[in-house]
Each structure stands twice: as structure tokens, then as C-alpha cells.
Image: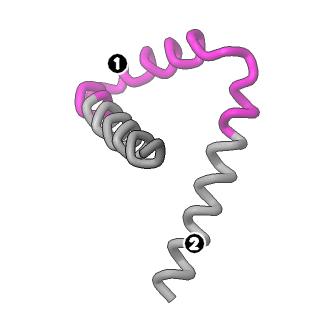
Amino acid sequence: MSSQTRKNDLVVLIQFWRAVCKILTTQRLRSFFWYMFFAILPVDTTRIFNDIQRSMTTMGRIGWNIKR
């Protein structure tokens, strides 16, 4: 059950990010958004981004293996 709710949360998050990206069409808005994003986030953003990058590369590797 918990995995299902987690999946639903992920879907909602992806839809939210798509909406945000659609809203941020102009460059000024986008740079402002990124400024706010980094201002709101805690100081350990580098750790978070490293985690995201690691998970992305892992997912890419898995996807590549599946494709092969």
C-alpha cells in the first residue's frame, strides 16, 4: 500500500513540475524561479543535487540495461 501511495505522490510531483515548467516560459521568470528555488532550499543543496544526480545515473543505467 505504501509503495502505491508513493507512486501516486511521484505522479503528482511530475505533473506539478510540468505545470511549473509550462508557466516558466520567459527567461526572466525562469531565472527568478531558480533564484527563489535556491533561496528557499536549505544550505545542503549540493548534497541533494548529488543524490538526485546519483539516482538519475542509476535510473539511466537501469533503463539502458533494459533497452539492451
Viewed as shown, does residue 59 lie left or right of 28?
A: right
What residue is shown at x 36% (from left), y 19% (from top)? Answer: 28
Q: Residues within 10 Å of mark 2 (few under 14, many from 20)?
A: few
Viewed as shown, does residue 1 lie left or right of 50?
A: left
Farthest front residue? 1
Residue 66 on image: x %, y %: 50, 81
What residue is shown at x 61% (from left), y 16% (from top)? Answer: 41
- Which residue position is annotated with label 2? 62
Q: Which residues are magenta?
A: 20-49
- Which residue position is annotated with label 1? 29
Looking at the rendering, in which quadrant would you find the N terminus? top left
Magenta-colored segment: predominant secondary structure: helix
Residue closer to the observer: 22 or 65 = 65
Residue 68 on image: x %, y %: 51, 89
Q: Is residue 26 located in the magenta-colored stretch of the structure?
A: yes
Name the kind of residue labelled 2 in the image.
Ile
Q: Residues within 10 Å of mark 1 (few under 14, many from 20)?
A: few
Q: Secondary structure at mark 2?
A: helix
The quarter of the displayed image where residue 32 is located: top left
